[in-house]
Amino acid sequence: MTRETTGRPRSAAAALVVAASLTVAAGAAHASPLLELTGGVSDHPFVSAHLGDGPSVAYTNPALLTQGKVSSFFGVMVVSQALSIDLDPRDPSHDISEAVYKARLIGEDGLLSPLTIKPLATSDLAEPRGSFDPSGSAGYLVLGSTTPIYRDRLFLGFQFTLPMAEFERQSPFFVDEREQFFSNSLHFELLEDRLEGNAAVLALAGEVLDTLSVGVGASMVTLSEANSDVFIGDPSYSTGGNINPHVKISTLFLPHAGITWEPTSAWRLQATAHFAGGHKVRGRSSVQLWSFPYAEGENSIDQDFSLVYRYQPLRLGFGVRLGADPDSAGVRPWEAALSARWSQWSTYLDRQGESPSETWADTVELSAGAGVLLGAQRVGLDLRYTPSPVPDQVGRSSYVDNDRAALGLSWTLPLARGWDLGLQGQAHALLARATVKRADASNPVFDEFPDSADLKTGDLIPESQGLQTNSPGFPGFSSEGWIWTGGIVLRRAL
């Protein structure tokens, strides 16, 4: 098999890839989808914004810092993703043959022109279709503290979530035929590496009135700029090159806020707002080649890129808590909460910094939770339903996401000298979902090998007729799975 090469030498393309790969390693703490999913190590992981107390509410609802005990905690949390994506069998007639390397498009005037998109022959793909396993597990250290800073009216709280293995993992991927050059697989858009990373949250809350509290907080996010200067002296690239990567990481803070109103001892109303944002990586690869004929005014081959990780949309939450009157120690024998949270997923940006071609839906998530005191011990039960914002992927893109139903259980046991031990477990079921591609989709699967002629003979290439694609999501796929979490935490009232 032979392949025609035109334009810049392969060494330039190889250098661009190498340089770009060096620039995506920078990372730091982000707004955390992990805390969104699990609620941290709160007694009430899904209604922490309404029943929570202590440092865990610094993220979910900072106004509650004024309601709970002043305390510190230290614990461990484990998250296991047992995920499955099954790709539908593909008829071999849709494979791209090696004839694509000598194919030319036939214009209306009969002239031949290069393919606008240059796929690989299916047999030349580096990875088998669907070979990536989306499952994985990760452990985290969690710690936090709250403290009064002015007359028991103004409180400060913070919490950190620190991975015990990889401090940070960022795994970009494409959701269409472009992923053939990389994992050649589909990925869960809102899970996988989004749940693997560190998080830092700081919050401040104050009692405006005896019945009214407000709080504001911030999650640390970063803007990374990564530029690589590359010089290659050997056009064959056989001896490598000289590479100077330059990385700059700027710290930003993504705000959130909460408010609570307690008109009676039993009732409390709450609202929260978490603003949109995520971690961004942008950069440039500048490659210099020895004795290369650059265009006039240029002295390098430049390639820019921009990525977005862990993007979270605007979220607005509302809830109500009902509880029994507290006993002499200030502990309520029971309490319960209902909540709803709206998320503006229509503004979503994927890992490539692209908006989905078919706009996602805004969603409303529903949660309920209750806690009861059994002697000196406290038991909690939470439920949550989260609809997927992703429309049916019947066209070119293959964003994988599922509706989720979740159950959370917690148990708190008092220990000596103001310490208590908390245990928590969660189960998140990804409800089964199946997708079949359709030819009448608004943005259908792209024909990567359209009807073409042989470069040398001018004859029509039979293998180019019909639809040929290496898109891993074609002709369809199904997804489901479970996410399991467990946590143990030591708390001490200050």
Image (cartoon, rainbow, N blue to C red):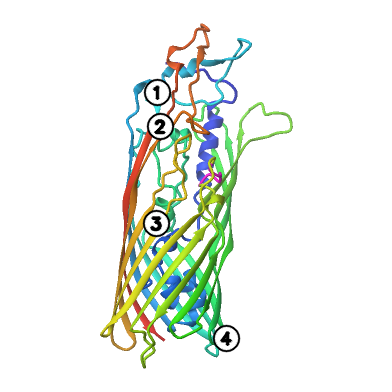
The x and y percentages for residue 1 are 42, 16
Q: Earlier in the sequence, mark 1 or mark 3?
A: 1
Q: Earlier in the sequence, mark 1 or mark 2?
A: 1
| Residue in the image at 48% along x and 79% along y | 65
Q: Residues within 10 Å of mark 3 (few under 14, many from 20)?
A: few
| Residue in the image at 59% along x and 26% along y | 8
Type of residue at label 2? Answer: Phe
* Dot label at residue 155: none
Q: Earlier in the sequence, mark 3 or mark 2?
A: 3
Determine which residue is flagged by label 1. Answer: 94
Looking at the rendered structure, the number of numbered marks drawn on it comes to: 4
Residue 372 image-quadrant placement? bottom left
Drawn side of residue 111 relative to residue 414, left or right: right
Determine which residue is flagged by label 4. Answer: 209
Determine which residue is flagged by label 3. Answer: 166
Determine which residue is flagged by label 2. Answer: 474
The residues colored magenta run 351-356
Q: Earlier in the sequence, mark 1 or mark 4?
A: 1
Report the front residue among 294 and 331: 331
- Is residue 287 located in the magenta-colored stretch of the structure? no
Type of residue at label 4? Answer: Leu
Q: Nearer the viewer, mark 4 or mark 2?
A: 4
The x and y percentages for residue 382 are 34, 68
